[in-house]
Image (spheres, helix red, strand yellow):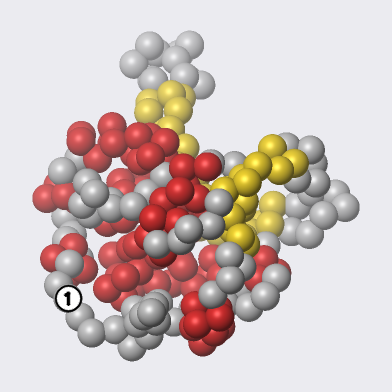
């Protein structure tokens, strides 16, 4: 199995969570950019990933997965760390009309080359914590379409509190740093909705991660 990322610390977190001893290597990808890669063998984990819906060459085939609700916040955080973004910027577009028209924008987004995957993420997020977002198709000449699931500021803040439910959760720290300023300004109690999963109660899962010897 292989996981690649431009962030070496994301792969270090992966190795820590899975107790891997595999080394992280640096390589140049197709467009010529340097990335990091970790490779290892684990037939038990591989078979388990197949059992919950993952497939080889998943980029174009990925769809709904058997992720228990009580672990979906962690799963969603991993998706954002790997294939998503937490975009923060200052919008001064109307500042020429009035200096008060300056806004801090926030968007949580996830991209995928397989439309059923963001559609499942969108539906599950709506069911669990009441966020819907929008799905857009991005077209580049000569390439396959890319599907973008994007949440605007209010829903993004709710998502951030949900996915970073504890300070110690494994995550890509540079993305959490983008989220921190909005999380500190808007405590959970101000969101008007507190999903049951924030209680982090222990619930028996239907598809537990296989134990290692």
- Left or right: 198 in relation to 100: left
Q: Position of residue 144 (x, y in %)?
A: 78, 59
Q: Which quarter of the figure has residue 56?
A: bottom right
- How many labels were placed on the picture? 1
Q: Quadrant of the N terminus?
A: bottom right
Residue 53 visible in the current orientation: no
- Left or right: 41 in relation to 71: right
Q: Which quarter of the figure has residue 90?
A: top left
Q: Is residue 105 above or below residue 123?
A: above
Which residue is nearer to you in this view: 85 or 94?
A: 85
Which residue is nearer to you in this view: 166 or 211?
A: 211
Which residue is nearer to you in this view: 3 or 135?
A: 3
Residue 204 visible in the current orientation: yes
Q: Is residue 93 above or below residue 188?
A: above
Q: Position of residue 59 (x, y in %)?
A: 67, 66
Label 1 secondary element? loop
Q: Which quarter of the figure has residue 71?
A: bottom left
Q: Position of residue 8 (x, y in %)?
A: 52, 42
Residue identified by numbered label 1: 202
Which residue is nearer to you in this view: 57 or 88?
A: 57
Q: Residues within 10 Å of mark 1 (few under 14, many from 20)?
A: few
Q: Quadrant of the C terminus?
A: bottom left
Farthest residue to the right: give it.
Answer: 142
Residue pictured at 23% horizontal, 84% vertical: 204
Residue pictured at 47% horizontal, 19% vertical: 92
Residue pictured at 16% horizontal, 49% vertical: 188
Residue pictured at 39% horizontal, 20% vertical: 102
- Left or right: 90 in relation to 6: left
- Left or right: 129 in relation to 200: right
């Amino acid at each position: 199995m292989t996981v690649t990322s431009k962030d070496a610390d994301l792969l270090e977190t992966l190795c820590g969570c899975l107790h891997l001893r595999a080394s992280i290597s640096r390589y140049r990808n197709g467009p010529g950019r340097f990335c990091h890669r970790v490779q290892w063998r684990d037939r038990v984990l591989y078979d388990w990933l197949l059992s919950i819906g993952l497939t080889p060459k998943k980029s174009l085939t990925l769809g709904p997965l058997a992720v228990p609700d009580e672990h979906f916040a962690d799963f969603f955080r991993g998706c954002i760390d790997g294939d998503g973004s937490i975009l923060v910027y200052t919008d001064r577009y109307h500042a020429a009309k009035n200096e008060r028209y300056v806004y801090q924008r926030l968007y949580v987004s996830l991209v995928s080359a397989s439309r059923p995957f963001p559609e499942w993420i969108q539906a599950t997020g709506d069911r669990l914590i009441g966020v819907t977002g929008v799905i857009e198709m991005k077209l580049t000449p000569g390439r396959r379409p890319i599907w973008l699931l994007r949440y605007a500021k209010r829903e993004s803040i709710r998502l951030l509190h949900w996915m970073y439910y504890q300070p110690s959760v494994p995550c890509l720290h540079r993305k959490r740093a983008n989220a921190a300023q909005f999380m500190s300004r808007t405590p959970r109690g101000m969101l008007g909705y507190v999903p049951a999963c924030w209680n982090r109660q222990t619930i028996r899962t239907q598809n537990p991660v296989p134990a290692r010897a």
